[in-house]
Image: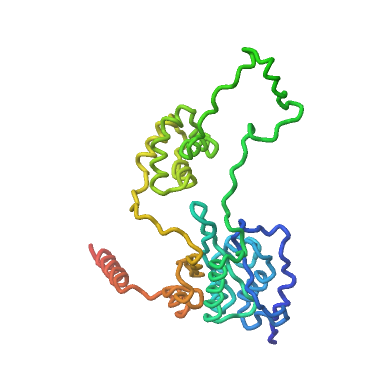
């Protein structure tokens, strides 16, 4: 007896209220112009792909779309099976993965989004739609995500709103000034971004806690990094990643890293000044299988050329003649050894 499968069979698989959302600007994005949901949605897909598609279709915009998160919510399949299903859904025209630059200047960040369409679309539709997304960004239209994902700098305890009970007393009249109420000393100069980045190291990892004198001593080296075009976030990440279990002398350790890991000097050719006629960077589509970036027209079905060839061959890679010859030689050597007295 043959039982017809409908996507309504997925109704029992409810989306958990605790399903994680992606960071602002990331995650699922619904494509426009989709048909209303029906019982026959995804009916022509295989069982596994229909199962995954029905779940993804009910996720809200902004939901995390990583293979790991989907596998946690879909107990019937592991990460490899989910990855294969997403690749098949990309070929079927239901999704595309893209990279998108948001923000401007030093605040530019790459965000990763998965555009989803319940209604299957062909390659021409996806290419046109993603080009429209690019045009709306260059024209200044609000993108579907915030213009920047940079986290604003948090205030320190000294910058927090003062307690009214401990508010400073109003200044005394000028006629009552004494030596005890002499004018305060001159306000210190603003701290440089390099100094602040060094001071932040201890907050990122206690093993790299530096004193004020240490920060002042290392400031010129850190400033050289920033002069080469890197951001303070990059500087902090480079100094705090891959730390040993114990750092005996944080200042000496940081000085060594500042010397050994300094980025290369980039050409000093001035970049053209931005203007209203300068288009925003195009969206870069990602291969749904391996993540290789490229223009939408270069990734038909959302797959790069090698992954598309592997998919067309049923996932079986072409054997390498060199490897085959090496295996045959190894087996012949083993047979000779077995024949030896």
Name the residue nearer the viewer: 3 or 41.
Answer: 41
Name the residue nearer the viewer: 201 or 194.
Answer: 194
Quarter placement of the N terminus: bottom right
Query: Looking at the image, what colour scheme do you see?
Result: rainbow
Q: In which quarter of the image is residue 24?
A: bottom right
Left or right of 268, for residue 75: right
Which residue lies most toward the front here? 175
Residue at 44%, 58% in the rendered image: 273
Residue 286, position in %: x, y?
49, 68
Residue 319, position in %: x, y?
36, 74
2 lies above or below 10: below
Residue at 37%, 47% in the rendered image: 263
Residue 312 in view: yes
336 lies above or below 117: above
Residue 38, position in %: x, y?
73, 80
Residue at 64%, 67% in the rendered image: 76
211 lies above or below 236: above
Left or right of 293, for residue 41: right
């Amino acid at each position: 007896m043959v039982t017809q499968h409908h996507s309504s069979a997925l109704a029992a698989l409810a989306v958990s209220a605790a399903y994680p959302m992606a960071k602002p600007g990331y995650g699922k994005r619904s494509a426009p112009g989709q048909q209303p949901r029906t019982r026959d949605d995804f009916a022509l897909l295989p069982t596994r792909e229909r199962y995954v598609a029905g779940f993804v279709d009910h996720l809200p915009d902004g939901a995390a779309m990583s293979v790991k998160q989907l596998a946690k919510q879909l107990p019937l399949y592991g990460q490899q099976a989910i990855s294969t299903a997403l690749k098949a859904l990309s070929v079927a025209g239901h999704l595309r993965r893209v990279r998108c630059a948001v923000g401007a200047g030093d605040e530019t960040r790459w965000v990763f989004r998965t555009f989803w369409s319940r209604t299957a679309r062909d390659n021409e539709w996806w290419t046109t739609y993603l080009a429209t997304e690019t045009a709306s960004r260059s024209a200044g239209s609000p993108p579907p995500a915030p213009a920047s994902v940079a986290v604003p700098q948090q205030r320190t305890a000294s910058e927090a709103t003062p307690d009214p009970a401990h508010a400073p007393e109003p200044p005394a009249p000028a006629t009552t000034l004494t030596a005890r109420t002499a004018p305060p000393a001159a306000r210190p100069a603003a701290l440089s971004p390099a100094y602040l980045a060094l001071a932040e190291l201890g907050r990122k990892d206690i093993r790299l806690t530096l004193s004020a004198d240490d920060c002042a001593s290392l400031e010129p080296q850190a400033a050289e990094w920033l002069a080469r075009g890197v951001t303070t976030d990059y500087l902090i990440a480079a100094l705090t990643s891959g730390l040993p279990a114990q750092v005996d002398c944080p200042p000496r350790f940081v000085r060594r890293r500042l010397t050994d890991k300094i980025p290369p000097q980039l050409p000093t050719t001035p970049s053209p000044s931005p203007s209203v006629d300068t288009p925003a960077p195009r969206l870069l589509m990602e291969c749904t299988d391996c993540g290789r970036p490229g223009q939408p027209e270069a990734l038909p079905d959302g797959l790069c050329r090698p992954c598309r060839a592997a998919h067309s061959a049923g996932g079986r890679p072409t054997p390498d003649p060199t490897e085959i010859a090496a295996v045959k030689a190894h087996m012949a050597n083993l047979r000779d050894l077995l024949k030896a007295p």
